[in-house]
Amino acid sequence: MTKKLKLRLQTIVSFIEKEDKVIDIGTDHLKVPIFLIENNLCLKADGSDISKKAIEKLRNNLNENLKEKIELFISDGFKNIDLSKYNTIIISGLGARKILDILNQYPLINQKLILQPTVGINLLKEEIIKLNYKMIDEKKIIEKNKKYITFLFKKI
Ligand SMILES: C[S@@+](CC[C@H](N)C(=O)[O-])C[C@H]1O[C@@H](n2cnc3c(N)ncnc32)[C@H](O)[C@@H]1O
């Protein structure tokens, strides 16, 4: 039985489509990829984190079935990721400046971006245009008295 996700993470999932191949950058607990795979919501869902400790913990704790389906990477942003394998990039739980640093590491092809910054909403909206992305949708929620905005951006 799949655990229910927090509303903040459910909002991210709501932007995923059946044919998507997803990489969750800065995944930490891997909750979104696990939910996507366990519920057959997309073709592929992998996770990466800069923290070796976080990835090792996941490698030790994931059940065998999920280990076969979900690839894990230790990576600073996109540095160890083959972006050509993914059409969807999730980055959540980081500030806008860090998100933009990651997005600027390599030219993106035409991946859709699902971004949920902790701070710097305006900065993100201003700077994303320079990467030839436009906002398709935004969803605002409040969870435990905290506001979260989740954006869907696509290449122009
Ligand atoms: C607050 S957690 C967010 C976890 C999850 N994405 C979420 O929204 O609940 C931030 C995670 O991003 C990772 N992180 C920070 N900088 C990173 C980078 N440059 N590349 C990849 N992961 C990074 C941290 O190690 C941490 O696990």
Image (spheres, helix red, strand yellow):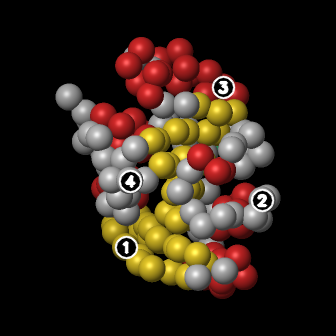
User: 45 above or below 114?
Assistant: above
Q: Amino acid at mark 3?
A: Lys
Q: Nearer the viewer, mark 2 or mark 1?
A: 2
Q: Identify the element where label 2 is drawn.
A: loop
Q: Nearer the viewer, mark 2 or mark 4?
A: 4
Q: Is residue 115 visible?
A: no
Q: Amino acid at mark 1?
A: Lys
Residue contact between numbered discs 2 and 1, judged by CB atoms under 8 Å: no
Q: Which residue is mark 4?
A: 19
Q: Which residue is mark 2?
A: 106
Q: Which residue is mark 3?
A: 53
Q: Which residue is mark 1?
A: 139
* Residue 9, position as x, y percentages in the image: 38, 53
Q: Identify the element where label 3 is drawn.
A: helix
Q: Amino acid at mark 2?
A: Tyr
- Quadrant (top left, top right, bottom left, bottom right) of the C terminus: bottom right
| Of residues 12 and 82, the one drawn nearer to the viewer in this rendering | 82
C-alpha span from label 3 to label 4 = 31 Å
Q: Residues within 10 Å of mark 1 (few under 14, many from 20)?
A: some
Sequence-first disc among 1 and 3: 3
| Of residues 142 and 106, the one drawn nearer to the viewer in this rendering | 106
